[in-house]
Image (cartoon, rainbow, N blue to C red):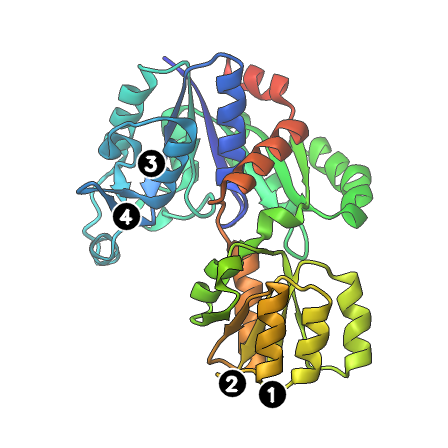
Amino acid sequence: MAAGIYVGSTAGYSGKNMVIMGLGLRMQKDGYNVGYMKPVGAMPQERGGVLGDEDAFFVQDVLGLDEPSNLVTPVLVTQDFKVRAFSGQCEDYMPGIVDAYRQLASRHDVMVVAGSGSMYSGRYCNVDGIRVVKELGLKAIIIDRLHKELNYDYLVVLKDTLGDNLAGVVLNDIPANFMNEVEGLIKPFLERNGVRVVGVIPKDPLMGAIKVGDLAERLGGKVISAQNKSDKVVENFLIGTMQVENFMTHFRKNKNSAVIVGGDRSDVQLVALEGNCPCLVLTGNLYPNDIILTRSEVLNIPIVVVRDDTYTVAKKMEVILSRHKLRDVIKIRQGAQLVSSSIDFAYVKEAAGL
């Protein structure tokens, strides 16, 4: 039977795919035949007439795998599934998960099993991460992504709950100015409580970046100029509602930031264009004047026009940049590199029984 590693997290959008692909690619490089499974899929997608999970299809593509969807993701959370589950018609899905896992594991040296949402997601029909880990007898690696603060209490409680099944945790998206606190206080605290920290992944602006064309689509807007540059990358955003002098000070410090500004503020628009921002996002469904349009074409800087007001767009941008999925080749490569250089692979392999 293959060795098995479960990759879960304290919340959704914590970097599970990045860590799974990083682990998988690294183990393939080390000569292991790596299998993949996502027992519970919450993102149904049809491919070639077959229903599966969007993330599961994507990770299989990256790892060069092509296993049947009904084995890779035996439980798909559709609207119909939720209705049945909430009205008390939930069958026991665990035997099907165990059977699918055994079939896949028989073909590989090591299985990487992906969680869905947090470790408690799916509890309403008994397919949460805690139960999956215990039923399949896996070693779990839990990712905690810094969002305002780390979930150190959650991680200690998970150790109490999972016991020896918890191989360790990965602290993700840690900015440079927080590294000392993580290394000097939080990591020693967790290890005193029996929680092994197997990796600390630094914050990398590229991992949260998004292409201008994708951003326009997500904001429900459209690119009205320099469309051929829609693959430029946005890492952050600035709101151009302040006086031009103050805006320029902020702008110089924040490269690769899209500038969100009212369509009638041509003064700020011009400063942003001349300062080579990746794109302008004009709010209120207001189109720019001819001077701005011409400069945008000359400087190859796309302009996106959206219907919402500036505040609404800024809130949407915050969500998009914190939850944007890893889909670009450049990000996969960068993510795999981050995982490779930040995680204690010797320990992970030993914990998994390789």
Q: Which residue is identified by label 4?
A: 45
Q: Position of residue 348 (x, y in %)?
A: 58, 21
Q: Earlier in the sequence, mark 1 or mark 2?
A: 1
What element does badge 2 sit on? loop
Q: Earlier in the sequence, mark 3 or mark 2?
A: 3
- Rendered residue at 39%/15% (across/down): 2
Please state if 115 lies on the left or on the right of 318 as rendered: left
Q: Which residue is identified by label 1?
A: 264
- Rendered residue at 31%/14% (across/down): 106
Q: Are marks 1 and 2 in contact (CB under 8 Å)?
A: yes
What element does badge 4 sit on? strand
Q: Which mark is residue 39?
A: 3
- Cα distance in 3D space between marks 1 and 4: 41 Å
- The picture quadrant where one finds residue 183 is top right
- The amino acid type of the residue labelled 4 equals Gln
Please state if 320 lies on the left or on the right of 256 as rendered: left
- The amino acid type of the residue labelled 1 equals Asp
- Cα distance in 3D space between marks 1 and 2: 7 Å
Q: How many marks?
A: 4
Of the 4 image quadrants, the one containing the N terminus is: top left
Q: Position of residue 99 (x, y in %)?
A: 25, 25
- Rendered residue at 63%/54% (across/down): 147
Q: Nearer the viewer, mark 2 or mark 4?
A: 2
Q: Nearer the viewer, mark 4 or mark 3?
A: 4
Q: Nearer the viewer, mark 1 or mark 4?
A: 1
Q: Are marks 2 and 4 in contact (CB under 8 Å)?
A: no
- Cα distance in 3D space between marks 2 and 4: 36 Å
- Rendered residue at 17%/42% (across/down): 49
Q: Which residue is identified by label 2?
A: 286
Q: Are marks 4 and 3 in contact (CB under 8 Å)?
A: no
